[in-house]
Amino acid sequence: MRDDVTQAVKDETVKGEVFPILIAKLETSQGNVLVWSGIGLLEFNGETYYGTGDVGSVSPVKESGDEIRANSVNFQLSGIPSERISVALGAEYQGKPAKLWLGFMDGNDLIGDPILLFSGRLDVMLIDEGPETSTITITAESKLADLKRARTRRYTDEDQQIDYPGDKFFEFVPSIQNVEIVWKG
């Protein structure tokens, strides 16, 4: 079993009836999207999460086990009035944090501390517009996905000045590129 599971959660999972829930926090420039898989309001980490009921879904969360691999998760919200799509289109979301927790409920109360299932960054949003309602799907990828991206930084004075203005470390690199060095032995 995972190390981050509290005793209260372990006790809940061995009961005859278990009520698991998912809690998601997606950050955007328009504010945080705070939702959970139930109905009504849920207080968690000092924030109020809104229940999505049957209109929200999350793709399965895959863990890599022994292998280090970048995984992704899709968050989907359907039944959105078409006139509200402009809010999603105007939001800056790429690279913003996304988190997904697994928790357990006992009636209306959250039991123990939910388990963080996924932590990553928002990537791509797809909107399926209908005549009256729309569906938004947004993909979040783990931070390991950065390892696959090409690096566009260079060992030049110009590039060094971006992070360290006034630093002279790479100042003479262009002048020594074609210098012939003769070693005497």
Image: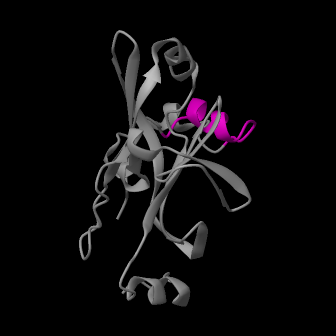
Asked if 10 appears above or below 32 in the picture, the reply is: below
Asked whether residue 181 appears in the rendered view, the answer is: no
Residue 136 pos. (x, y %) = 40, 29
As displayed, is residue 1 above or below residue 139? below
Examine the rendered structure and indicate whether residue 29 appears above or below residue 20: above
Q: Is residue 25 magenta?
A: no
Determine whether 172 is above or below 147 in the image.
Answer: above
Residue 99 locus on image (x, y percent): 51, 54
Q: In which quarter of the image is the C terminus?
A: bottom left
Observer able to see residue 183: yes
Q: Position of residue 69 (x, y in %)?
A: 28, 61
163 vs 122, nearest the viewer:
122
- Judged left or right of residue 117, residue 70 is left
Q: Which of 34 and 159 is in front in this view?
A: 34
Magenta span contains residue 164? yes
Q: Which residue is drawn at 46% across and 24% down?
A: 80
At a point 40% along the width and 12% down the height, the residue shown is 132
Left or right of 27 on screen, residue 129: left
**The N terminus: image quadrant:** bottom left
The quadrant in which residue 64 appears is bottom left
Over which residues does the magenta segment extend? 155-168
Q: How many labels does the image show?
A: 0
Instruction: Please provide percent x and percent y for residue 49.
Output: 62, 50
- Who's the residue at 33% across and 50% down the image? 72
Q: Viewer-proximal residue, 29 or 68?
A: 29
- How is the model colour-coded? one colour
Say whether residue 41 is left or right of residue 35: right
Question: What's the residue at 31%, 55% (across, down)?
Answer: 70
